[in-house]
Image (cartoon, grey):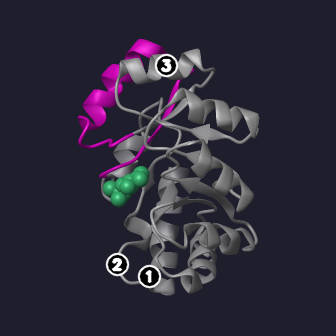
Amino acid sequence: MMPVLVVKDVSLARPMAEALVAGGLSTLEVTLRTPCALEVIQEMSKVEGALVGAGTVLNPDDLERAVKAGSQFIVSPGLTAPLAQAAKAHDVPFLPGVANAGDIMRGLDLGLSRFKFFPAVTNGGIPALKSLASVFGTNVRFCPTGGITEQTAADWLALPTVSCVGGSWVTAGEFDAEKVRQRATAAALLQQN
Ligand code: 3PG
């Protein structure tokens, strides 16, 4: 399970990453949706055991800034050829968003086989992903995000083409380290089942 983080206050970066890692979640997506996001990536990257990447990466400039800040992977809500090429040029793992068969086909043409199914619930949820995945076989894998909850994550993870799920529920609400650690522990258990 990959927590999708929207961090507004850089002073929360370290304690938030520490609480997530302590709970068993080590792959952290920091969205570039707040002015301090790049600093948050730098701070979280200092936490032992954390693998920190950038999300909401919309274009090659975003990608460049995210990589400079220490991002170890890149997530995007969509897929463009310039962004995919920039990821390749920087040799950084890239998880672009797809919503339909055409998106996946463009991704395959660009040499990609791992996609974020986004926004997962609005796009038709599990039935939609099952139909899409059946066309492409098991070499194409998905990380659904968008509308997934602690209650529904296990259903998504049970799909053979789903490698992980993303979601913001682990850190939702006002930051409370203990609450985040507990939610992370529950989410980490999901991924082991
Ligand atoms: C994302 O960028 O993946 C989503 O904003 C996460 O969606 P959620 O807030 O519904 O979990």
Q: Amino acid at mark 3?
A: Arg
Describe residue 82's horizontal placement relative to residue 126 as left or right.
right
Q: Label 1 vs label 2: CA separation?
A: 10 Å
- Check whether the beta carbons of the residues at disc 1 and disc 2 lie within 8 A of each other: yes
Report x, y in % for residue 15.
Answer: 60, 83
- Residue 106 is marked as 3
Q: Amino acid at mark 1?
A: Lys
Describe residue 24's horizontal placement relative to residue 3 as left or right.
right
| Neighbours of disc 3 within 10 Å: few (<14), some (14-19), many (20+) | some
Dot in front, 2 or 3? 3
- Residue 173 is marked as 2
Between discs 1 and 2, the one toward the N terminus? 2
Circle 2: element type: loop
| Neighbours of disc 2 within 10 Å: few (<14), some (14-19), many (20+) | few
Dot in front, 3 or 1? 3
Residue 186 in the image: above or below residue 126: below
Report x, y in % for residue 71.
Answer: 68, 56
Residue 93 in the image: above or below residue 103: below
Between discs 2 and 3, the one toward the N terminus? 3
Circle 3: element type: helix
Is 3 or 95 nearer to us in this picture? 95
Q: Amino acid at mark 2?
A: Gly
For residue 78, which quarter of the picture? top left
The residue depicted at 63 percent of the width and 77 percent of the height is 18
Circle 1: element type: helix
Report x, y in % for residue 86.
Answer: 66, 36
Give the labeled residue for mark 1. 179
Report x, y in % for residue 121.
Answer: 27, 43
The residue depicted at 58 percent of the width and 31 percent of the height is 82
Q: Which residues fall within the magenta stretch? A: 118-147
Among all residues in the image, which is located at the extreme front?
A: 61
